[in-house]
Amino acid sequence: MRDLFIATILSLGLVGPAAAQGDAPDGAIQSVIDNQFQAFSADDFDRAFTFASPTIRSIFGTSETFGAMVRNGYPMVHRPAGVQFLDLREVDGALWQRVQIRDAQGAFHLLDYQMIETENGWKINAVNYVPDPGAAV
C-alpha cells in the first residue's frame, strides 16, 4: 500500500498544481507539518486529515483510510521520536519542505513534503520518501 501511495503522490507532484509563490512563509509551512505530526502522535486522524490538500483528501476519502495508510506505511511519521526541518525549496514551481525524522528505533528518514497554499492556508499535497544516498544502487 505504501508503494501505491508513493507512486500516486509522485505522479500528482509532477502534474499537480504549482504552489502559490511569493514569500513562502517557512514558519507557517513547518507549523502545518508539525501540527500533523502532533495529531498523528495522538491518533487524531480526523485532525491530521485536515492538513492534507483537497487532492489527498479525495484520494483517501476518509480520515480512517488515511490513518490506516500512515500507520501501516509510514510508522516513522505516525510515531516520530524526533523531527528536524531542513531546507524549503522550489522545484518546478512547487514548494518542497525536507524533513528528517528519527523513528522509535533511532533510524533516520528523509521525507519531502510538497506544500500548496489554498484558501484555507498551507496544505500537504504530497510526501515523498527520499532514498538514503549512501545505500547501494
Image (spheres, rainbow, N blue to C red):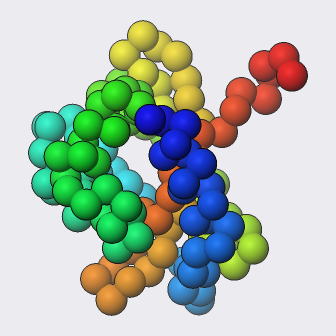
Question: Where 9 falls versus 84 (above or below)?
Answer: below
Looking at the rendered image, the quarter that the C terminus falls into is: top right
Residue 28, horizontal then vertical, whole percent: 39, 69
Q: Residue furthest top?
A: 105
Closer-to-camera residue (55/136):
55
Q: With 3 as the anchor, is 68 left or right in this view?
A: left
Residue 54, horizontal then vertical, whole percent: 35, 73
Residue 111, horizontal then vertical, whole percent: 56, 42
Closer-to-camera residue (100/4):
4
Question: Where 77 falls versus 12 (above or below)?
Answer: above
Q: With 78 as the anchor, is 132 left or right in this view?
A: right
Residue at horizontal 17%, vertical 46%? Answer: 64
Residue at horizontal 55%, vertical 23%? Answer: 108
Closer-to-camera residue (111/68):
68
Residue at horizontal 37%, vertical 61%? Answer: 59
Residue 71, horizontal then vertical, whole percent: 30, 31
Q: Is residue 53 visible?
A: no
Closer-to-camera residue (98/19):
19
Looking at the rendered image, the quarter that the N terminus falls into is: top left
Q: Quadrant of residue 19?
A: bottom right
Question: Where 15 falls versus 20 (above or below)?
Answer: above
Question: Where 118 falls versus 35 (above or below)?
Answer: below
